[in-house]
Image: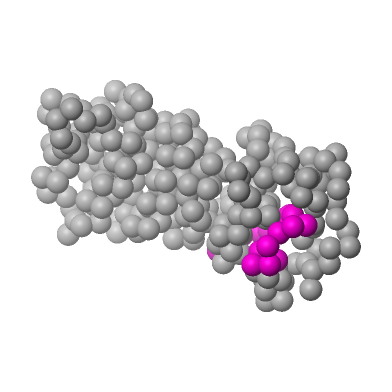
Amino acid sequence: MLSKKEVITSRQNPTVKQICALLDKKARRESGLFRFDGLKLFCEAIACGLSIERVVLSRGAAGTVTDAVEREIESGRLEISRVIYVSDEVFSKLSEERAPEGIVTVARAIEHKHRALSDACELKVESGERLLLCEALRDPGNLGTVIRSCAALGVERLVISDDCADLYNPKTIRAAMGGLFRTEIDILPTASFADAIALLREGGRRVYAAALHRDAKVVGELELRPGDCFVIGNEGHGLSQTVIDACDACAIIPMTEGSESLNAAAAAAICIWETVRAK
């Protein structure tokens, strides 16, 4: 059983301050750690084998939360020394949730899965892998939702430009709903985004820019082949001309007259589904 004898009651406690600091991107990069709220993400992280550095429980956490943590300790997948209790007042400082469940998890960054490509030539994609590319998705909620769709629909590689939102932003993690932790998908940030597209085309893949263009083809009318992939652009400005020029062609998703452009994450889900259907 977990013991509540030692409960941290000071907001100035070094561990509390360190976990609060992980809301900042610089602190995450320097420490190699990231944090997230909630029981579901804790369970997903354990199931995916993440390296858990710390589990913080509110003294008033519900039995469902403490029971789940105790089960993981008993199974040997979580060390009891990694778990600490804090007062409800201190936890309110730690949590970002409007209705917190009483658990915050700190994990080590998944460097072997989400590593930056220093050069596009490092991009090695197997011929049968499903792929999606995203340029300059700045909204962490959008990026997280794209990751969630990739995980759900079987995309094995997500290549993102290095000016996309931070993968370990709590909002990205929350929107991804555990997709970030999944072993089935590799996420590759790169500064050589247009070069990565050129490399894919050289390897025989057709790459379509999801962008308005006078020669754009309707997504559902493309004769897609396995290996074809799409590039999704920034929420407000779409794809850069450099990236559009690097692709084989442009594709559009038809909408009713007078409608605004689709949310980037929604457009990504539609494009992914079209590649999944390709035979």
Q: Which residue is drawn at 25% across and 41% down?
A: 207
Question: In this picture, is 203 found above or below 82?
Answer: above
In the rendered image, the quadrant that contains the C terminus is: bottom left
Label tally: 0
Q: Where is residue 67 in the image (x, y as percent from the top left)?
A: 68, 70
Residue extending furthest bottom? 75
Residue 163 in view in this figure? yes
Q: Where is residue 149 in the image (x, y as percent from the top left)?
A: 37, 51
Q: Which residue is drawn at 33% across and 49% down?
A: 131
Colouring: one colour
Horizontal arrangement in the rendering, residue 236 relative to residue 227 (left or right): right
In the rendered image, the quadrant that contains the N terminus is: bottom right
Q: Where is residue 202 in the image (x, y as percent from the top left)?
A: 27, 42
Q: Nearer the viewer, residue 82 or 246?
A: 82
Q: In which quarter of the image is residue 105?
A: bottom right
Q: Residue at x 15, y 35 (%)?
A: 256
Horizontal arrangement in the rendering, residue 278 relative to residue 103 (left or right): left
Question: In this picture, is 100 found above or below 134?
Answer: below
Q: Residue at x 86, y 43 (%)?
A: 10
**Segment colored magenta:** 48-66
Residue 188 in view in this figure? no
Question: In this picture, is 182 found above or below 262?
Answer: below
In the image, is residue 203 part of the stretch drawn in magenta? no
Q: Quadrant of residue 226?
A: bottom left
Q: Quadrant of residue 153?
A: bottom left
Residue extending furthest right? 5
Q: Nearer the viewer, residue 5 or 47?
A: 5
Q: Position of residue 42 (x, y in %)?
A: 61, 59
Q: Nearer the viewer, residue 127 or 162?
A: 162
